[in-house]
């Protein structure tokens, strides 16, 4: 695939390799200052979950981004969520996010999803523009979150 003038390869992660764990260790802190990157065992569980598809973007052989697509059936339809999209700061603006999003949308359509949702912080203007360009629209809704207390 060619995005932003660069060759960008997007593939489904099928196993939790040391390379993948190292990439997540580098990428997740760029997404969230408080999230702990998953280790190989956690990555294996994420990859093995039947609703999940972990996509990785490579440029010149190096993993430069990731996206997790979750496709699930509820009583009203098949739905999809795009979560934890992160592109390495060194590779931003070169098409990795666009390539990951396009592939996630293709897979979700193929699996019968009626809608694909995602959230993006207001401060992530480049990401918001990318999603709008891909056809996403801001919904008139309120997202509620409950923080589950940690077990003691």
Image: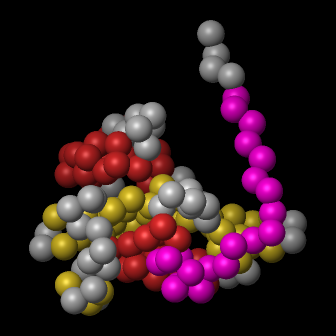
How far across and down, in percent of the image, does residue 102 sit?
A: 46, 82
Residue at 80 percent across and 56 percent down: it is 142
In the displayed structure, 118 sits above or below 132; it is: above
As displayed, is residue 71 above or below residue 41?
A: below
Of all residues, the one furthest to the right in this rendering is 75
Range of magenta residues: 129-148
The C terminus, quarter of image? top right
Count of labels shown?
A: 0
Asked whether the viewer can see residue 53, the reply is: no
Residue 7, how many percent across, how many down? 20, 84
Question: Is residue 126 visible to the viewer in this orientation of the structure?
Answer: yes
* Residue in front for this viewpoint, 135 or 152: 135
Residue 146 lies in the magenta stretch: yes
Residue found at the far left of this picture: 60
Identify the image quadrant of residue 100.
bottom left
Q: Residue at x 43, y 43 (%)?
A: 32
| Magenta region, main secondary structure | loop
Q: Nearer the viewer, residue 120 or 15?
A: 120
The answer to whether 114 appears left or right of 51 in the picture is right
Which quadrant, please, contains the N terminus? bottom left
């Amino acid at each position: 695939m060619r995005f932003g003038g660069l060759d960008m390869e997007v593939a489904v992660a099928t196993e939790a390799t040391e390379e993948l764990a190292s990439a997540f260790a580098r990428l997740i802190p760029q997404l969230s200052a408080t999230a702990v990157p998953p280790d190989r065992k956690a990555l294996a569980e994420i990859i093995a979950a039947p609703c999940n598809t972990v996509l990785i973007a490579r440029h010149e052989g190096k993993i430069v981004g990731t996206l997790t697509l979750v496709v699930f059936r509820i009583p009203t339809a098949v739905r999809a969520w795009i979560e934890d999209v992160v592109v390495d700061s060194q590779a931003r603006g070169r098409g990795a996010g666009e390539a990951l999003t396009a592939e996630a949308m293709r897979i979700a359509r193929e699996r019968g999803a009626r809608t694909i949702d995602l959230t993006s912080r207001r401060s992530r203007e480049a990401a918001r523009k990318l999603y709008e360009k891909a056809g996403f629209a801001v919904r008139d809704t309120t997202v509620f979150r409950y923080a589950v207390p940690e077990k003691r």
